[in-house]
Amino acid sequence: MFYKQLENGKYRFYEKFYDDREQKWKQVTVTMNSKSRVSQSEAKRRLAVKIDKVLSASTKKELELQKINDMTFSQLLNEWQNVRRSEIKPASFKSEMNFLHHFMEEVGNLRLSDYTTPQIQSYLLGLNIANVTRKNRKIYLNGIFGYAERIGYVAKTPVKNVVIPRVKRDYEKLKKAQENFITKEELGQVVAYCNSHNKEIRYTLAMEFIFLTGLRFAEFIGVRYEDVDFENHLLKIDHTIDYVSHKYDERVLTTTKTVGSVRTIILSQRCLKIIDYFRTNCLDEVFIFVTSKGQIMRQPKLYQFIKDRCDTVLGEGRVYGIHMLRHSHISLLAELGVPIKVIMERVGHIDESITLRVYSHVTQNMHDDVKEKLNRISL
């Protein structure tokens, strides 16, 4: 211990000590009124107390580690939201965050170190969802826990080794998948029924247009007159309406599902006639496919219209809906012998396997065509 006299006449006592945890010398001080033996003794006592306090207190590193060890899923989710918000589209962001909040509600807002692989696997397998959706949910969880691992909040993500069992595609499931489309003849029957029974013509034409173009619903409702090249019969698709994060009639435009979804497609004469009907009976100067009230078409309403009409004309038991029309368009192109690459460009698929999965079935017309060609062969 040593001391120095201050300008005010008091004495400041100093004591240096070595902190093994941080491997460096530190110093504590105390000010006394005099340098008498009694004062020096008291100063030594006070300095010893200060040294003990410093050595017993948590270091900055220890405090950081404690903070990490105590971090909960809700705290991680707050960070992850800021990261993901700038990475993905608003609709996808909303869907992912809704699921992660559901996970936290069901499993619990635990410390990150308390989550286990069996626990997460049990949660995923307990969800009453399709297996492909279950795999997608695992991706969401792997994303947020993978972030925690990279940042250093956990030593290893508990999601990595989660196993989603493969579901056997039995005959009934395969049959159901193969029935997720309708032929052009069947659509013709449905359209004829709608026309003869005075069903809403705008929804009837919408159903036919999606079948003939293979557009996704968000792409379809986003089609504007300025996107159509009437002279060259082309339609430019480079945006969609975000009806998930915003209201339909706010008409918020966003990018397409993927970069590969930006495309220009050829419109048939029938497609141009459908557009011409909406232009002749124009209720909106910007967007083409609006209702009789001039509103952007709603997904639930159009879905129900398609399902009800198809159930009535073609019979119940099959999966009818908006995306079914897109699948049907791909099947139609395959039946017409259109090359896979051309189909991919038309419907905005980047991955060939996605397109192949859609028309993995073989239509009756394709069977008949093979039969006819085989019958022509003579040896």
Image (cartoon, rainbow, N blue to C red):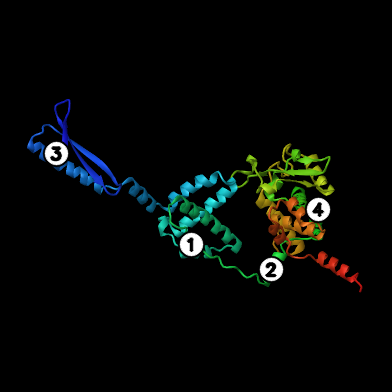
- For disc 3, the marked residue is 43
- For disc 1, the marked residue is 120
| Residue 180 placement (x, y as % from top left) | 71, 62
- For disc 4, the marked residue is 195
Query: Quick check: 292 above or below 137?
Result: above
Q: Earlier along the polypeptide chain: callout 3 or callout 2?
A: 3
| Secondary-structure class at tag 3 | helix
| Residue 73 visible at all | yes
| Residue 117 placement (x, y as % from top left) | 47, 63
For badge 1, the amino acid type reads Ile
| Secondary-structure class at tag 1 | helix
Q: For the residue carrying disc 3, how many other residues have a C-alpha within 10 Å: few (<14), some (14-19), or many (20+)?
A: many
- Compute the Cα span from label 3 to label 4: 101 Å
For badge 3, the amino acid type reads Ala
Image quadrant containing the C terminus: bottom right
- For disc 2, the marked residue is 174
Q: For the residue carrying disc 1, how many other residues have a C-alpha within 10 Å: few (<14), some (14-19), or many (20+)?
A: many
User: For residue 115, which quarter of the picture?
Assistant: bottom left
Q: What residue is shown at x 36% (from left), y 50% (from top)?
A: 65
Q: Earlier along the polypeptide chain: callout 1 or callout 2?
A: 1
Of tags 1 and 3, which is closer to the observer?
3
Tell whether label 1 touches label 4 (CB within 8 Å). no
| Residue 323 placement (x, y as % from top left) | 69, 55
Query: Quick check: 127 above or below 194?
Result: below
Q: For the residue carrying disc 2, how many other residues have a C-alpha within 10 Å: few (<14), some (14-19), or many (20+)?
A: few
Q: Earlier along the polypeptide chain: callout 1 or callout 3?
A: 3
